[in-house]
Amino acid sequence: MEHTSLLERILRGIALTLVVIFFMFPIVWIFMMSFQTNETILRIPPQLVFKPTLANYTALITGKLTTAAGTLDIAFMRNLWNSVFLSVTSVAVALLLGVPAAYAFARHKFRGSEDIAFTLLSFRFAPALLVLLPLTLYFQKLGLANTYIGLIWVYQLICLPLILWIVRGYFEDIPADIEYAYRIAGHSWFATFRKIALPLAGPGIAAAGLLAFIFAWNNFVFALVLASADKQPVTVGALAFITSSGIQYGQISAAIVLSITPTLALALYAQRYLVEGLSLGAVKG
Amino acid sequence: MTAATMQRNRPSGFRISKRVLPYVLSLPALLVCIGILIPFFTSVVYSFQRYRLSQPWARQFNWGDNYISFFTDPRFWNTLEISLLYAGITVLLELLLGLGIAMLLQKRSTLNNFISIMLLMPLMTAPALAALMWKLMTNPGFGVLSYLASLIGLHDFRWASSPSTALFTVVLVDIWVYTPFIMILLLAGLRSLPTQPFEAAALDGVPRSFVFFRITLPMLTPYILTATLFRLLDSIQQFDIIYAMTQGGPGDTLTVFQVEAYLNFFQSTNVGRSAALMIILWAITYFLSNIFIKNWLRLRERARGQA
């Protein structure tokens, strides 16, 4: 074991503390703001001790904000529902399309397979607006503008490459001999896929799905360009908040908290797979 | 098992379906993506056209005019400069910080693992929402960071709303969101390094700086390259943080490629210029992604080898 002096241990401790403060402070602070009234928020210096209120959350959840000037409608619950619906459906579609393709790429080296796989990967790195801006004009002609179907289709750009490349890695990790033995026993390839490959790659598929969900949920630019207010997810909806009159800072904070909680919770749940997912399967955690 | 032995040993009766099967399995995924390729070619066409949504009747091919006019267009040079500057600064700072933090957390302990999981939270926050969080914290009226800045004598620090500090502010948000990305990849890299060289160096009493520069860094290089290129590819295309924070402002301070293309398209409805901008950005990312994929493949093979 290497010897560490007391001074070094203290310095390390200080450095780590600063790191934790820098990365955690914004989340903690917005969380605290979401339980404050506008009067507390506007007080200077900022208050560390306050009487928490749930008013911001009730305003968001009931969709009605009562102020001195009258009642205001907030459509945030609609945004939240859009986020859930768009992310869940996009991931479901991406799994349906991506898992068989990943299996094909992992098990069969067919002509053009690597080219196709890399083309799919390259979507991950192309500038989104390159495709999105002409797509708005096409979508208007096709009647896909501001529809869930159009959005879910475009969301495949995020979900498919991720699922394809991660799940492919998990299929490659399964020894081909196991599947082969099952085939020898007279089972069809589909039975082999369903009874052997899918269960063995199951945890990896689940993790890829969770990650794809996080990325779909966090996406901003697709819906900003292609969706209007009634189809917008939280990322776009929350931004509209800050410019709309009458909404208070406490409600914006509460909206942010509600919007980031699902992804943070999923990330903590799936953290074992995050390294692999974030590097598209290049690095194992 | 090699492909040849698999073919020799496979059960008979599947000859045709076996050859077609992989295509059948991957076709749906491919078809969905081909729909996306069409707009890409449309972008190429638009970039060679004089095309304004406000004057659809004047739409015609002007061939390279959109590109040639960039040479004398200060707004374009500003876009190029600010995009490269943004990508360069964010990636460099995130790399240094990420490497530092990864080394602090290298030793496996409950506390270190706990901290590294906590640090994932900014990365899992939607960048657009992260920008919104920082916008609330830097609000000149009540923002806690504005208050803290005033405590150290910066009484009128305008953060993202002043041209002189706007870049600093968005870079700060980018660092907050993406440093954990580099940190987590390098941490995985550090922990996968073989221990023998380090034990040998410790036995021989080799100085720490020598160990770092001659053993740790060279062995970590593939991880550093992959993480850096990955981030460069994303950072040169940054849209969410900048748009959510300042919409490219104040003025044209932060009109990076994607923000400028978005504003060109939706505000000045100049589709031709917007498309030409995107093609140039695409050329840059295409070049970077080719280097990236080479490194990424090398790492991926290594990771598969470990399994």
Image (cartoon, coloured by chain):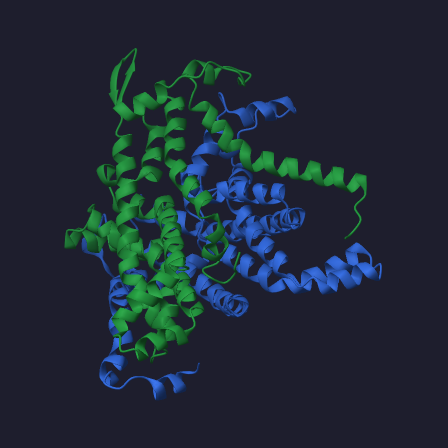
Q: Residue furthest bottom?
A: B8
Observer-nearest of A217 and A192: A192
Identity of the residue drawn at 45% across and 61% down:
B285
**Which color is chain B depicted in?**
blue
Kindly tell me whether residue B173 is visible in this rendering.
Answer: yes
Identity of the residue drawn at 34% across and 23% down:
A57
Left or right: B155 with respect to B62?
right
Identity of the residue drawn at 54% across and 35% down:
A24
Identity of the residue drawn at 51% across and 40% down:
B173
Counting from the top left corner in percent of width and height, residue A235 is at: 35, 39
Counting from the top left corner in percent of width and height, residue A103 is at: 34, 69
Q: Is residue A145 above or below residue A39?
A: below
Counting from the top left corner in percent of width and height, residue A6 is at: 80, 39
Q: Which chain is green?
A: A
Q: Residue furthest right?
A: B205
Q: Residue furthest front?
A: A185
Q: Is residue B173 above or below residue A249?
A: below
Left or right: B90 with respect to B207?
left
Left or right: B250 with respect to B16?
right
Q: Is residue B41 above or below residue A229?
A: below
